[in-house]
Amino acid sequence: MSKVLYPMQLMPSFKDYIWGGQKLKTLFQKQTSMDPVAESWEVSVRDEGMSVVRNGEYQGKTLKQVWEYLKEELVGRHADPFPLLVKLIDAKEMLSVQVHPNEKIAKKLDSEAKNESWLILDCETDSHLYLGFKEGVAKEDVQKAFLDNTIESLLRKMPVQKNQVCFIPAGTVHAIGKGCVILEVQQSSDTSYRLYDWNRLGKEGKKRDLHIKQAMLALDVNLRPQIFEMEKIEQIEDSQRYLILQTPYFTIEKWSVKEYVKIPHIQTTFEVFFIQKGKGKISANTTVDVQMGETVLVPAKIPSIELQTEDEIEVVRICLH
């Protein structure tokens, strides 16, 4: 392979967890025979769910192969380990109540830390998220509630609407409620400790495993994330730029573009574009046609990025600092 840099259209890896549905197919034209479709791993170098490049010089190569070959030219200054995992999630039913470890606990448990965020792409009128414990809950209360099967009574149940966002720091006990379709941006980790699973049975007719010892070590009863709205930060002619979230781990924006806009790209970070609505073109050394539901990775060392459309296109932009 020669070291060619261009916008890479990615084929995702799908997951058929028991709580999934059909909305990734109906809303975003995801093509798979899998049923249900719970998750679509859009940007991943993980062996358990690998993205594959579907266009250009690296067509048919896994993103991991391309990353190992290009390193800083692809990712930028945070090249190793690969910093992000980006997923689409369709929660037809509630996800388990779980927690991810921070760096300190992850080292102790020989696992991987995970901080993550949720952008609500679609939801029902009565959809909720579960984010942390109620005020005054102590670890002893959590341990007792596990034994009594009353964990649900301790959780903060928060209503949610389309286009809202939240950041879930490591240590936060959380769950996605039914009816939510979410874009999840996180550190490249698949470590989750399940604390409660709504007493349901898995595909084999048995309850899924819980990870109580690890979860109790990882959870912080004082973390209570908030749900908030994205903020408009710039108007460029007829196009709008919104800040969704800025964290030490990643930055997420939304761009609503009419006709044309040049993205302010710095060559220290790669850019991920998820096409939430419409169709158009991304130009970065070369031009690729994109449409709703696609995810494109633009390498760090490309000098400029432009978005074009004949009508209007909405994209979620993800990058590092």
Image (spheres, rainbow, N blue to C red):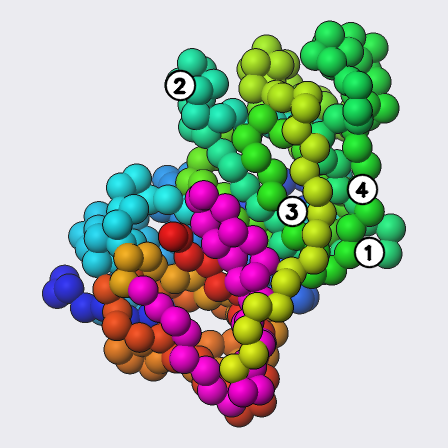
Q: Amino acid at mark 3?
A: Cys
Q: Which mark is residue 124?
A: 1
Q: Is residue 246 magenta?
A: yes
Q: Secondary structure at mark 2?
A: helix
The residue nearer to you, when weighing 279 against 230, is 230
Q: Amino acid at mark 1?
A: Glu
Tell me residue 113's x, y (percent): 46, 29
Q: Which quadrant of the structure image shows residue 97?
A: top right
Which of label 1 and label 2 is nearer to you?
Answer: 2
Residue at the spot 48% in from the left edge and 54% down from the top edge: 251
Q: Quadrant of residue 209?
A: top right
Q: Which residues are magenta?
A: 237-266
Estimate the spatial distance between the alpha carbons at disc 1 and disc 3, rounded to whole Å.
Answer: 17 Å
Residue 105 appears left or right of 162: left
Find out whether the residues at labels 2 and 4 contact each other: C-beta distance under 8 Å: no
Question: Residue at the location (54% across, 41% down)?
Answer: 116
Q: Is residue 127 magenta?
A: no
> Dot 4, how many residues are within 10 Å of its Cα: few (below 14), some (14-19), or many (20+)?
few
Report which residue position mark 4 lands on: 158
> Which one is nearer the viewer's eye here, 59 or 285?
285
CA–CA distance in space, label 3 to label 2 = 26 Å
From mark 2 to mark 4, how far is it between C-alphas?
32 Å
